[in-house]
Structure formats: structure tokens, C-alpha cells
């Protein structure tokens, strides 16, 4: 098996792991500061300017700068002092700092209210630019602009194509679109 022209047996696993960014539904936020959580798992030192730039790209700069201690604000156990949308935007800022070649978004907006989802969608749109992105989602608004959609039905792929193709050629996909996007 190959990735590009390279045999996967010859690929350094640690190198490839560092090329992947992940934003999921359940964000890992730890006790400590916003700074601690944004740089968590990254092996470089980042200046405050780097952190603020990543927070701005993630639509998180305003809420962090409004906090009493900015980057050094304590977030509480599991981020208890932050909303779900704020935790999600910190995870996106972390992914921006990582600068991954491959991005995995696993239900990244599933547990958010409509206002937070809209803000997160904008941030994710910026993050996905120029990257191979795998999006796992039930909300069709998350995937509608994807180049290629794999529709999974009863554990098997039942349709492959972009949104326009599937809407015209996959009955169940069209039904989902009608239910989710037309109401």
C-alpha cells in the first residue's frame, strides 16, 4: 500500500502523526490556562503573537481577550468556565498552530447551538483551506460543500459524489437534505 509514491512500510509513523490535526465533538480541555490548552500536545514553543494569531483565525480572540487574564485565564476542571463553543474554538486554534496537512473533523459542530455552530463553521472553513480534510458528520450543513461525500447506510457506503450528484442520484441522501436543510 502506498501514500502518494511512498510505500507505507517506509513512512515514519511519528512524522505522519504530526501531520494530522483533529477537532472532535468532545474536546479535551484540561485544568490550567487557555495558553496551556491551546499549545497542548504541540512540541514547539509559541510566542504570544503566534497564539493570538491562531485564536483570531479560530474566532476566539475576542472572548479570550475579554477574559480577566487573557491567555493566562484558568479554564477550570475540564474547561468548566468555558462554553461548548469556546472550548471548540480553542481546539480549532490548537489545530491552526499544528498546521496539519491532514485534518479530521469528527462531529465538530454536533453539540453546539446555532449561533456557535455558525461561528465554528467559519473557523473550520479557514482551517480546511489547503488541507486534505475528512469530515464525519450527521449534519449535512457541515459537509454540503465537500468535494466528495461518502454516504453510509446500514454500515456500508451506498453513495459517493459531491452534494449535487448525490441529491440527484441518491434517494436517501435527498431525503436527508430535504429534512435537514429545507425545514
Image (spheres, grey):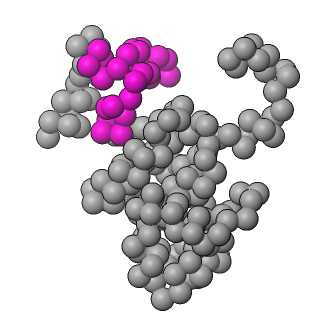
| Residue at screen point 48% across, 89% down | 68
| Residue at screen point 36% across, 40% down | 142
Corner quadrant of residue 12: top right
- 172 on left or right of 154: left
Name the residue nearer the viewer: 20 or 78.
20
Q: Is residue 30 visible?
A: no
Residue most toward the top?
A: 169
Residue 56 screen position, x and y as percent = 44, 63
Name the residue nearer the viewer: 142 or 125.
125
Q: Is residue 147 magenta?
A: yes
Residue 116 screen position, x and y as percent = 33, 60
| Residue at screen point 27% across, 60% down | 115
Q: Classify 166 as above or below 183.
A: above
Residue 120 screen position, x and y as percent = 38, 54
* Segment tinted magenta in the rendering: 140-166
Q: Is residue 114 magenta?
A: no
Corner quadrant of residue 171: top left
Tell me the quadrant of the picture where the C terminus can be found: top left
Tell me the quadrant of the picture where the N terminus can be found: top right
Residue 131 screen position, x and y as percent = 53, 35
Amino acid at each position: 500500500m502506498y501514500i502518494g509514491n511512498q510505500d507505507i512500510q517506509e513512512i515514519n509513523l511519528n512524522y505522519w502523526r504530526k501531520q494530522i490535526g483533529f477537532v472532535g465533538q468532545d474536546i479535551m480541555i484540561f485544568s490550567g490556562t487557555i495558553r496551556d490548552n491551546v499549545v497542548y500536545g504541540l512540541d514547539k514553543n509559541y510566542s504570544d503573537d503566534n497564539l493570538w494569531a491562531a485564536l483570531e483565525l479560530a474566532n476566539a480572540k475576542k472572548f479570550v481577550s475579554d477574559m480577566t487574564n487573557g491567555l493566562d485565564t484558568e479554564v477550570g476542571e475540564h474547561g468548566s468556565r468555558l462554553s461548548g463553543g469556546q472550548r471548540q474554538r480553542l481546539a480549532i486554534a490548537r489545530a491552526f498552530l499544528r498546521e496539519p496537512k491532514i485534518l479530521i473533523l469528527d462531529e465538530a459542530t454536533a453539540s453546539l447551538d446555532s449561533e456557535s455552530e455558525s461561528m465554528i463553521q467559519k473557523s473550520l472553513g479557514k482551517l480546511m483551506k489547503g488541507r486534505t480534510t475528512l469530515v464525519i458528520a450527521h449534519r449535512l450543513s457541515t459537509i454540503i460543500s465537500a468535494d466528495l461525500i461518502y454516504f453510509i447506510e446500514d454500515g456500508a457506503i451506498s453513495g459517493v459524489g459531491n452534494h449535487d450528484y448525490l441529491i440527484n442520484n441518491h434517494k436517501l441522501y435527498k431525503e436527508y437534505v430535504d429534512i435537514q436543510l429545507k425545514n
